[in-house]
Amino acid sequence: MLLHVPAVLSAEALSVFRIRLAEARWDDGRITAGPQSGAVKHNQQLPQDSETARELGERVLAALDRAPLFLSAALPARVFPPLFNRYAEGMDFGSHIDNAIRRVPGSRISIRTDLSATLFLNPPESYDGGELVIEDTYGTQSVKLAAGDMILYPATSRHRVMPVTRGERLACFFWVQSLVGDDAERTMLFELDRAIQALGGGNSNHPEILRLTGLYHNLVRKWGSP
């Protein structure tokens, strides 16, 4: 499932993010790449242990908790601490697949990367190029969203970032371990949840709505794992 989640960050929050990122020190983006992706990764990244990365990452996590579309689609069990990258002119990230397991720095916690997420931080008209290109079962999708919007997609997808030819592209990215690891099962649950919400419309005590809601939760119990 490829899902556009709009307005994760407000205009006010984005203004704070861009000020902090303009003041930050950027490192070579290959510091978090594996051997294969490191060979095709040409960007910059905030150091994971920097004060700016921690502060902005906490703001992103708080925003995700207020994003019902994300919560419904991802069914998150764990979210990797958000990272931040920058693509200046001439930078790109070649075709790759994200690592299946990510160890959270400074902990013994490992996260299975079921879903990848990119949260765009500056307006698309402020730079040329920089599209996120995702290859999925429905073909190749090119994504370049408004500032504050996020794209959520299976981490099993092959993807790349096209070269930036003008300006700079700023984004936050992270991975999600879902309570439901199978993408097809998670997609069915998401569609069922959306249908229940649409049909409920203030009458959530209707017997058929209650029946569908029970079915949803029983499927989560059947397919889910903490």
Image (cartoon, rainbow, N blue to C red):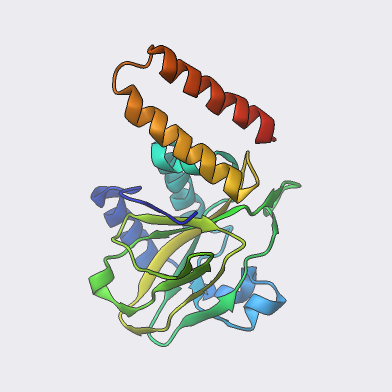
User: Where on the picture, by quarter, is residue 170?
Assistant: bottom left
Q: Which residue is painted at 37% across and 16% down in the image? A: 204
User: Whole-percent x and y of residue 151?
Assistant: 42, 57
Q: Is residue 16 visible?
A: yes
Q: Is residue 13 shown left or right of residue 208?
A: left
Quarter of the image with the C terminus is top right
User: Whole-percent x and y of residue 98?
Assistant: 63, 66
Q: Residue lying farthest right?
A: 108
Q: Nearer the viewer, residue 58 or 103?
A: 103
Q: Is residue 23 visible?
A: no
Q: Is residue 224 shown left or right of residue 20?
A: right
User: Where on the picture, by quarter, is residue 19?
Assistant: bottom left
Q: Which residue is painted at 58% across and 57% down in the image? A: 49
Q: Which residue is painted at 57% across and 60% down in the image? A: 48
User: Whole-percent x and y of residue 127?
Assistant: 29, 77
Q: Which residue is painted at 42% across and 76% down in the image? A: 87
Q: So how many labels did they put on this image?
A: 0
Q: Nearer the viewer, residue 173 or 203?
A: 203
Vertical arrangement, residue 183 with respect to residue 33, above or below: above
User: Whole-percent x and y of residue 37?
Assistant: 63, 76
Q: Is residue 79 shown left or right of residue 125?
A: right
